[in-house]
């Protein structure tokens, strides 16, 4: 396995919390797990905040992107509501995941279940400059399906 590109300090709120890890050698996301005392049932269309028990010290110039787990979304209809959620480099609080059940059946999350993925990514910051107009493009103002289905 290659050397990591970046080291991110992580505080565990309990010895029972498992650090996120990559499940395969080429995975870009690390699985985040539910830090719960007891199971939580999510009814259809209900949203919940699920703690991870983790506090990250993400280096300046990077962010943590919280993304859905594809299997959970496909099989159960459970996804990250604000996907991708962002963990800013200056945030030092416990990370919670906002999940929503878009499925037709209640879904139960148990302590330790894998509920989301974390991708650490570089951040680009832009300087916005007011302009009198913007240059034309081939696409123009076409949006929301203008290029086809």
Image (tube, grey):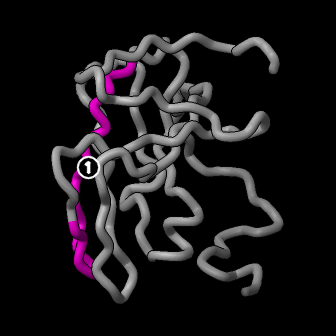
> Front-most of 19 and 97?
19
Task: Locate residue 37, reporting x and y percent.
Answer: 16, 45
> Front-most of 16 and 115?
16
Which residue corresponds to the image point at 28% horizontal and 80% vertical from the top-left? 106
- Can you say whether 106 is above or below 59 in the image? below
> Front-most of 93 and 142?
93
Q: Tag 1, which secondary structure?
A: strand
Where does the magenta region start and end? 41-56
Which residue corresponds to the image point at 60% horizontal and 30% vertical from the top-left? 121
Q: Quadrant of the N terminus?
A: top right
- Can you say whether 11 is above or below 98 in the image? above
Which residue corresponds to the image point at 61% horizontal and 50% vertical from the top-left? 133
Q: Quadrant of residue 11?
A: top left
Q: Residue 17 in magenta? A: no
- Can you say whether 36 is above or below 124 in the image? below
Task: Locate residue 47, reporting x and y percent.
Answer: 24, 66
Q: Mark 1 highlights which residue? A: 50
- Residue 15 visible here: yes
Q: Quadrant of the C terminus?
A: bottom right
Task: Locate residue 86, reporting x and y percent.
Answer: 42, 39
User: Would residue 99 appear left or right of 86 to someone viewing this image?
Assistant: left
- Can you say whether 130 is above or below 145 in the image? above
User: Would residue 19 appear left or right of 17 to someone viewing this image?
Assistant: right
Which residue corresponds to the image point at 38% horizontal and 21% vertical from the top-left? 56
Q: Quadrant of residue 39?
A: bottom left
């Amino acid at each position: 396995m290659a050397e990591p590109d970046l080291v991110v300090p992580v505080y565990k709120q309990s010895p029972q919390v498992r650090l996120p890890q990559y499940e395969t050698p080429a995975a870009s996301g690390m699985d985040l797990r539910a830090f719960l005392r007891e199971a939580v049932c999510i009814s259809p269309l209900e949203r919940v905040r699920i703690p991870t028990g983790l506090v990250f010290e993400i280096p300046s110039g990077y962010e943590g992107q919280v993304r859905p787990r594809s299997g959970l979304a496909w099989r159960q209809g459970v996804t990250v509501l604000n996907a991708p959620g962002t963990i800013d480099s200056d945030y030092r609080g416990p990370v919670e995941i906002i999940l929503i059940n878009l499925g037709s059946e209640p879904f139960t999350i148990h302590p330790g279940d894998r509920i989301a993925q974390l991708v650490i990514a570089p951040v680009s910051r832009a300087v916005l400059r007011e302009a009198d107009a913007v240059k034309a493009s081939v696409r123009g103002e076409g949006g929301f399906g203008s290029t086809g289905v």
